[in-house]
């Protein structure tokens, strides 16, 4: 686990500024949700933390290290995307083992890590299946399994439930929270869904047009919104 410090971070695409000096402190083991309307810069911020986008200004720390210029592979993070991005020609076990094989981890260790992740996610009986043979929820679990096997300091989730139907989305919220209770890995979770933010977060960061409008516990934002945007956004579920 590690803390994450986001200090006055800015991002321009060409000459267009999209993140205008965002600062967020994330504690070791915290489950933080970045919420805000589509286009407000959530994914861009997450991708900068992952090292998939360059930083135009400010400082990013993971634990004690400044990571602004550190290649993605060297950052101790694992990201779960909204489109799963599973390899269709690989079994569930191989999908989960892939990053460890790339790192040339010993075979026995790979197996132990995959088995542990499968047990945590209830995937034990599905290890030999291919992605096309899985339901949406099972695919999402495999995507999480690929992150868990790496045992990272930080999990990054980008709208992981947006492709699931409403009922499954509710069930998966509970699963992801249970996973966090168990592993206590620092988690930064992006969503545009207020209900998801209100029910899952230790701490919510409300973003709007590339700035942070307010940071606080769910009830704090609900009871004492800093401005009309937060009041409207938190108060009126989509
Ligand atoms: P969110 O995830 O909150 O929906 P994004 O971070 O994807 O928002 O996008 C924030 C803004 O940056 C949007 O205006 C989007 O069009 C713009 N943007 C995102 N990626 C790029 C890119 N690669 N090039 C140019 N503009 C981009
Ligand atoms: Mg996005």
Image (cartoon, rainbow, N blue to C red):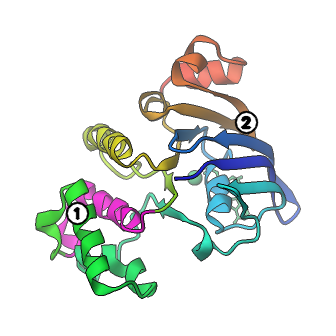
Which is the main secondary structure of the residues drawn in magenta? helix
Q: Name the residue under label 2.
A: 212
Q: Label 1 crowding class (10 Å Cα cut-off): few <14, some 14-19, many 20+?
A: many
Residue shown at 61%/39% (left/top)?
37
Q: In which quarter of the image is residue 111?
A: bottom left
Q: In this view, does 9 lie to the left or right of 148?
A: right
- Closer to us: 3 or 122: 3
Residue 134 point in image, percent of width and height: 19, 65
Q: Does the magenta stretch include residue 148?
A: yes
- Closer to us: 12 or 10: 10
Residue shown at 68%/44% (left/top)?
40
Residue shown at 33%/77% (left/top)?
97
- Answer yes or no: is residue 41 visible: no
Q: Is residue 201 magenta?
A: no
The stretch of residues the image draws in magenta is: 130-151
* Mark seen at residue 118: 1
Residue 225 point in image, percent of width and height: 65, 17
């Amino acid at each position: 686990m590690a803390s994450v410090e986001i200090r006055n971070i800015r991002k321009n695409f060409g000459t267009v500024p999209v993140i205008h000096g965002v600062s967020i402190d994330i504690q070791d083991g915290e489950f933080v949700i970045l919420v805000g309307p589509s286009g407000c810069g959530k994914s861009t911020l997450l991708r900068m933390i992952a090292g998939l986008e360059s930083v135009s200004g400010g400082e990013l720390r993971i634990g004690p290290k400044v990571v602004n210029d550190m290649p993605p592979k060297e950052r101790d993070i694992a990201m779960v995307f909204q489109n799963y991005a599973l390899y269709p020609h690989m079994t569930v076990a191989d999908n989960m083992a892939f990053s460890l094989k790339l790192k040339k981890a010993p075979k026995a260790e790979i197996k132990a890590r995959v088995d542990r992740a499968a047990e945590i996610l209830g995937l034990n009986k599905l290890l030999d299946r291919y992605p096309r043979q899985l339901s949406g929820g099972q695919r999402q679990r495999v995507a999480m399994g690929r992150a868990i096997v790496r045992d990272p300091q930080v999990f990054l989730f980008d709208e992981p439930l947006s492709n699931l139907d409403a009922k499954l989305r509710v069930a998966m919220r509970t699963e992801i929270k249970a996973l966090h209770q168990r592993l206590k890995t620092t988690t930064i979770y992006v969503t545009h869904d207020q209900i998801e933010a209100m029910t899952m977060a230790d701490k919510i960061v409300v973003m709007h047009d590339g700035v942070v409008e307010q940071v606080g516990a769910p009830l704090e934002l609900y009871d004492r919104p800093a401005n009309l945007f937060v009041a409207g956004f938190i108060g009126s579920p989509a």
